[in-house]
Image (spheres, grey):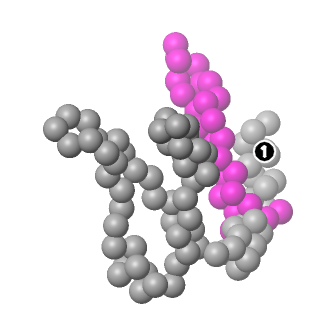
Amino acid sequence: MLWRFKAALEETFPGSIVEIDCKKINGKMHFSRMFVCIKACVDGFLSGCRPYLGIDSTHLTGKYNGQLVAYAVNKVFKGEVEHRECFRHLMANFRKKV
Protein backbone atom coordinates (compact mmCIF):
# COMPACT_ATOMS: atom_id res chain seq x y z
CA MET A 1 0.00 0.00 0.00
CA LEU A 2 2.90 2.39 0.65
CA TRP A 3 4.05 2.19 -2.95
CA ARG A 4 0.53 3.06 -4.17
CA PHE A 5 0.46 5.95 -1.68
CA LYS A 6 3.82 7.16 -3.03
CA ALA A 7 2.56 6.96 -6.62
CA ALA A 8 -0.67 8.80 -5.74
CA LEU A 9 1.21 11.61 -4.00
CA GLU A 10 3.63 12.03 -6.89
CA GLU A 11 0.77 12.05 -9.41
CA THR A 12 -1.40 14.45 -7.40
CA PHE A 13 1.43 16.81 -6.40
CA PRO A 14 3.98 16.82 -9.27
CA GLY A 15 7.48 17.77 -8.16
CA SER A 16 7.00 16.35 -4.67
CA ILE A 17 9.60 14.02 -3.18
CA VAL A 18 8.48 10.74 -1.63
CA GLU A 19 11.11 8.24 -0.51
CA ILE A 20 10.42 4.86 1.07
CA ASP A 21 13.25 3.02 2.81
CA CYS A 22 12.98 -0.71 3.36
CA LYS A 23 15.45 -3.15 4.86
CA LYS A 24 15.90 -6.83 4.17
CA ILE A 25 15.75 -8.87 7.39
CA ASN A 26 15.94 -12.67 7.24
CA GLY A 27 15.19 -12.59 3.53
CA LYS A 28 12.03 -10.47 3.94
CA MET A 29 11.57 -6.78 3.15
CA HIS A 30 10.53 -4.62 6.12
CA PHE A 31 9.46 -0.98 6.13
CA SER A 32 12.04 1.23 7.85
CA ARG A 33 11.07 4.86 7.23
CA MET A 34 9.39 7.23 4.80
CA PHE A 35 10.14 10.82 3.77
CA VAL A 36 7.47 13.04 2.20
CA CYS A 37 8.12 16.54 0.89
CA ILE A 38 5.10 18.06 -0.87
CA LYS A 39 6.11 20.56 -3.57
CA ALA A 40 3.54 23.19 -2.53
CA CYS A 41 4.92 23.21 1.03
CA VAL A 42 8.47 23.71 -0.24
CA ASP A 43 7.37 26.52 -2.56
CA GLY A 44 5.46 28.22 0.26
CA PHE A 45 8.39 27.92 2.63
CA LEU A 46 10.87 29.31 0.12
CA SER A 47 8.65 32.22 -0.89
CA GLY A 48 7.42 33.18 2.58
CA CYS A 49 10.19 32.44 5.06
CA ARG A 50 13.46 34.20 5.69
CA PRO A 51 16.68 32.21 5.45
CA TYR A 52 17.77 30.93 8.85
CA LEU A 53 21.20 29.93 10.02
CA GLY A 54 21.48 28.25 13.41
CA ILE A 55 24.88 28.29 15.04
CA ASP A 56 25.64 26.23 18.10
CA SER A 57 28.64 26.22 20.38
CA THR A 58 30.73 23.53 21.95
CA HIS A 59 32.14 23.47 25.46
CA LEU A 60 35.90 23.47 25.85
CA THR A 61 37.46 21.37 28.58
CA GLY A 62 41.03 20.95 29.62
CA LYS A 63 43.59 23.74 29.68
CA TYR A 64 41.18 26.29 28.15
CA ASN A 65 37.65 26.41 29.56
CA GLY A 66 34.70 28.17 27.99
CA GLN A 67 32.81 27.81 24.75
CA LEU A 68 33.84 27.84 21.12
CA VAL A 69 31.25 29.55 18.91
CA ALA A 70 31.12 30.75 15.33
CA TYR A 71 32.46 34.23 14.71
CA ALA A 72 32.76 36.77 11.83
CA VAL A 73 29.04 36.44 10.99
CA ASN A 74 28.81 40.15 10.08
CA LYS A 75 31.75 39.87 7.68
CA VAL A 76 30.29 36.85 5.92
CA PHE A 77 26.72 38.22 5.69
CA LYS A 78 27.74 41.91 5.38
CA GLY A 79 25.73 43.04 8.42
CA GLU A 80 22.36 41.98 6.96
CA VAL A 81 21.51 39.43 9.65
CA GLU A 82 19.90 39.50 13.05
CA HIS A 83 21.68 38.04 16.05
CA ARG A 84 19.70 36.17 18.68
CA GLU A 85 20.56 34.02 21.65
CA CYS A 86 18.76 30.88 22.77
CA PHE A 87 16.78 31.92 25.87
CA ARG A 88 16.86 28.41 27.33
CA HIS A 89 20.65 28.35 27.24
CA LEU A 90 20.95 31.89 28.57
CA MET A 91 18.74 30.99 31.56
CA ALA A 92 20.66 27.78 32.21
CA ASN A 93 23.95 29.70 32.24
CA PHE A 94 22.43 32.38 34.49
CA ARG A 95 21.22 29.78 36.97
CA LYS A 96 24.70 28.23 37.15
CA LYS A 97 26.23 31.56 38.15
CA VAL A 98 23.57 32.58 40.71
Q: Is residue 17 magenta?
A: yes
Look at the image and tell me whether residue 64 can be seen. yes
In the picture provided, is 44 more to the left or to the right than 69?
Answer: right
Q: Is residue 63 magenta?
A: no
Instruction: Give, as a single range, the part of the protein colored magenta.
Output: 12-38
Residue marked by disc 1? 4
In the picture provided, is 84 more to the left or to the right than 8?
Answer: left
Residue neighbourhood size for the residue with mark 1, other residues' Cα within 10 Å, grouped as few (<14), some (14–19), many (≥20): few
Q: Where is residue 15 in the image (x, y as percent from the top left)?
A: 69, 68
Which quadrant of the view contains residue 91? top right
What residue lies at 64% left-to-right and 75% top-to-bottom? 50
**Extreme residue in the left direction:** 63
Q: Where is residue 62 in the image (x, y as percent from the top left)?
A: 20, 34
Determine whether 67 is above or below 31 in the image. Answer: below
In the picture provided, is 45 more to the left or to the right than 86?
Answer: right
Q: Where is residue 7 in the image (x, y as percent from the top left)?
A: 75, 52
